[in-house]
Amino acid sequence: MSKAELLAPAGSLEKAKIAFMYGADAVYAGTAKLSLRSRAELNDDSLEETIKYAHSIGKKVYVALNIYANDTDYDEIENQIKILKKVKADAIIASDPGVIMKIKEIAPEIDIHISTQANTVSLHAANFWRSFGAKRVIISRELSKERIKYIMDNKPDDLEVEMFIHGAICYAYSGRCYLSKYLANRCANQGDCAQPCRWQYKVTAQEVNNPDSVLNVDYDDKGTYIFSSKDMCLIKQIPTIIEMGIDSLKIEGRLKTDYYLATVVRAYRKAIDDYNKLKEAGRESEYDASKYLVELEKVKTRGLSEFYFSDDQNQDIHDFDGKSENLEYEYGAKVVEKVDKDMYIVEIKNKLSIGDRLEILLPNTIEDCSFNIENLYDIKNDQPIDTINPGIKGQKVKIKIPYELQEGTIIRRKR
Ligand code: SF4
């Protein structure tokens, strides 16, 4: 059995470093112009730097060029493919057959991964993409466990399969949604979704012959997030997914913070590694996802669900609560450098005060590493302070931390 890859999002070099530090084998990013997260992507220079960095530590970078292109986009598409060839991207993620033809023409040496946007929902479709030159298909999020298993059991050996295991999910069939174009004039299929499915709506009714008779229709006091789906979470299904032989396990979230990224990547890294170790020891039945789930719950912004992968087709997949704002933890700080024994400069992300409870996200363990802040020092004059607010972006403070930490380590704060 080949080792499954853990694949994480990275909208910047900084995020790629965090993802790798916390256990990702590969990251995916987009070019600023032609991917489906056009507001959170790498420009050409940072893309090259990210790929160089990844290759220097034996990791990979896949680059999304997955818009459904207009004919007027093709000059820029050719330009981007030439750049990806020059910077040695490990694969290009694409969905539009026209774009794929261009990749084969200009950069035949680069692997092609078929984006989830292409909605590969069957073995026949997977075979089509293989015959069209794809190295990998990212299967549709709308597939049940049985349908994924059928594809895995019958696909050609040299076709890799990637699937989403965690993150936001569209209320519509992924990639076939016009809500954003309709309500915000921002087209999801051109990389510019405004996520109107997450907005709060008011449903009204009106008696047609009486324009003044507008009535609010309330399902219940939470019933107004009518389009918002919960987030996908398949942490309990890691053994099944590994045993199916899925090649790459993908985390969604190119717009999320590095704190979210570190937490989610670390939880899945540990889950995969722990399961593999249990299996080697013949104890795979002991896999228990509860401790990883506790971690994921700390950063969830919506409810979690297994969606189509679950046998329970009556599960509640709708997020009537809207965005969760009462999480027990928040992003506290990120380690910038070690300056002395137990003393670190950290960039603060939320207010820190003496006595606050902080938890360190150590990269190789999810065991509890918490402490209360005893000392904070102003970095300008080294004087002790009681509290500090983030204020300007990049605000830093010196803090005593009783653990050995590396640069980039994420620290969360109990609210
Ligand atoms: S509006 Fe929502 S459902 Fe539609 S593409 Fe955007 S995220 Fe997906």
Image (cartoon, helix red, strand yellow):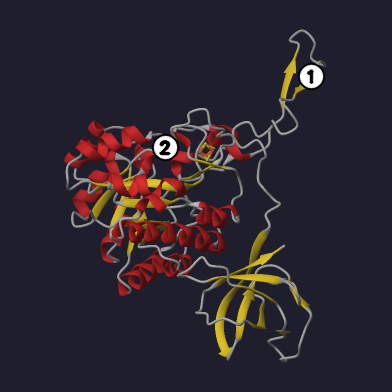
The residue sitting at 20% across, 39% down in the picture is 155
Classify 13 as above or below 231.
below
- Left or right: where 202 falls relative to 411: right
- Give the percent coordinates (x, y) of residue 157: 17, 46
User: Does any portion of residue 329 appear in the rendered image?
Assistant: yes
Of residues 343 and 392, the one drawn nearer to the viewer in this rendering:
343
- Left or right: where 190 falls relative to 384: left
Instruction: Find numbered disc 2 in the image and state the secondary structure of the residue it sits on.
Output: helix
The residue sitting at 27% across, 39% down in the picture is 97
Q: Residues within 10 Å of mark 1 (few under 14, many from 20)?
A: few
For marks 2 and 1 on the same chain, the one whose residue lies earlier in the sequence: 1
- Give the percent coordinates (x, y) of residue 256: 54, 56
Give the amino acid type for the residue marked by disc 2 in the picture: Phe
- Left or right: where 352 falls relative to 191: right
| Mark 1: C-beta under 8 Å from nearest atom of ligand 1 | no
Classify 398 as above or below 14.
below
The residue sitting at 29% across, 59% down in the picture is 280
